[in-house]
Amino acid sequence: MIKDFFEKLTQIFKTKDLRNKIFFIFALLIVFRLAANIPLPGIDVAQIKDLFAENQLVGLLNMFSGGGLSNISIVLLGLGPYITASIIMQLLTMIVPRMEQLHKEEGEQGRQKFNSITRMLTVPLAIMQTFAMVTLLKSQGIITQLSSFDMVLIIIVATAGTIFLMWLGELITEKKIGNGVSIMIFAGIVASLPTMISQTSATFDERDIYKYILFAAVGILTIVGVVFVSEGQRNIPISYAKRMRGNQSYGQAASHLPLRVNQAGVIPIIFAVSLILFPTMVGGMLAQASNESLASFGQTLTDLFQNQWIYGIVYFSLVVLFTYFYTAVVFDPHKIAENLQKQGGYVPGVRPGSETEEYLGRIVTRITLAGALFLGTIAVMPVVVSGVTGMTALTIGGTSILITVSVVIEIVKQLEAQMVMRDYDGF
């Protein structure tokens, strides 16, 4: 197995085009990490370390910003506003027919226009989220004095940082070795590993050895679970009708349609964490309001999501919901059934057309349920363990493992697909 791995790795780096793509992505990730370590003007970052140690939600937000939040850097929000804009646009495809037409039916030009709208929507969201984040930091005493000019400057710089990362993410995606947003989040997680290891070593206590063993067991179980769900699929048998040309028959063949248990990949986790952090940010803003009722509501909202069990239930529900939602976006039974019928294909025992569409929809719903529940369980398992052991780092670590393993699997699949394509083309 190890020998095969090194042979494939050697083959990848021997392919000039693929090697250049990998080096290009590494260069962009280095630029991203440099930006995440350039602090915003006029901000003292020393006090924020305590906040991350005490508040797991802020720690998760820092993870999804690629570490930019912990340094109050020029990429303070990371790709959070872009992810939020993507969620809104995906929801609109299910509500507004014109958006669905742009996204699915108008080809490459329609997708480019759809992506342009997503980018434009990212700008106001970045402005609002930067203001909300600065307000939250002020409420925690991290930022004490801030003039109107400083606030405007921070909003402009942080918004520009988000747009810059969005551009880098799209450049990475264009290389077709994985999703740019996921890879950048993955890079932020990997970059934080040395700090996490050193902190764990510094605070290691032999009396809590069982907690570390439990954490390791949860980590291994999470890795196995993610691989199991990501690789699991159900093959739907497909037969093609026989066509006669003269005295010869053509086209009769048997194949299969692979339906993955989790077609959404790591996207549900990214979407879920992005949304679950939103109430805390809103609560932090409202808690500073002069109106007592608003301030009380804001504090209640913040305290509500500090509760481990409520946080876990909401997190689990959002993961399941977004797994179904994103599967509905990427898999269209109507289109699959229509294409099969045009090509003379059919599912044995099922009539072509509407019955095939219903059959595929029913199968996808059932296997997605299993995948969504399993993914949601893996996502909240570290939260449960954290509640038992009292180690908040377990929550962040579990989510990090979930994202890291999913992204690595996706990158490996993309690389293998590109290698197969080059072998097929004779490169």
Image: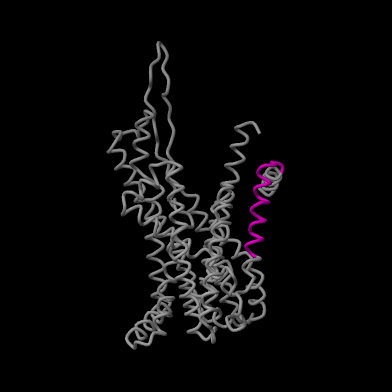
Q: In the rendering, at what x and y percent does residue 81 appear?
A: 47, 64
Q: Which residues are magenta?
A: 14-33
For the point 40% across and 51% down, which residue is it? 327
- Front in this rendered view, residue 206 or 154: 154
Indicate left or right for 338 with 198 as reference: left
Does the stretch in magenta take in 20?
yes
Q: Is 358 one of the magenta-colored residues?
A: no
Q: Nearer the viewer, residue 386 or 409?
A: 409
In the rendered image, residue 62, in percent from the top left (x then y), is placed at 54, 71
Q: How is the image coloured?
A: one colour
Q: Residue at x 50, y 50 (%)?
A: 231
- Which image quadrant for residue 201? bottom right
Q: Say which residue appears at 40% left-offset and 74% top-offset.
A: 279
Asked which quadrant contains residue 274, the reply is bottom left
- Name the one closer to the observer, 30 or 345: 30
Q: Main secondary structure of the magenta part?
A: helix
> Whole-percent x and y of residue 197?
65, 72
Q: Quadrant of residue 14?
A: top right
If the image is split into quadrants, where does the C terminus sit?
top right
Instruction: Decide: is 419 above or below 64.
Output: above
Q: Is 317 left, or right, of 148 in this rendering?
A: left
Q: Residue furthest front?
A: 149
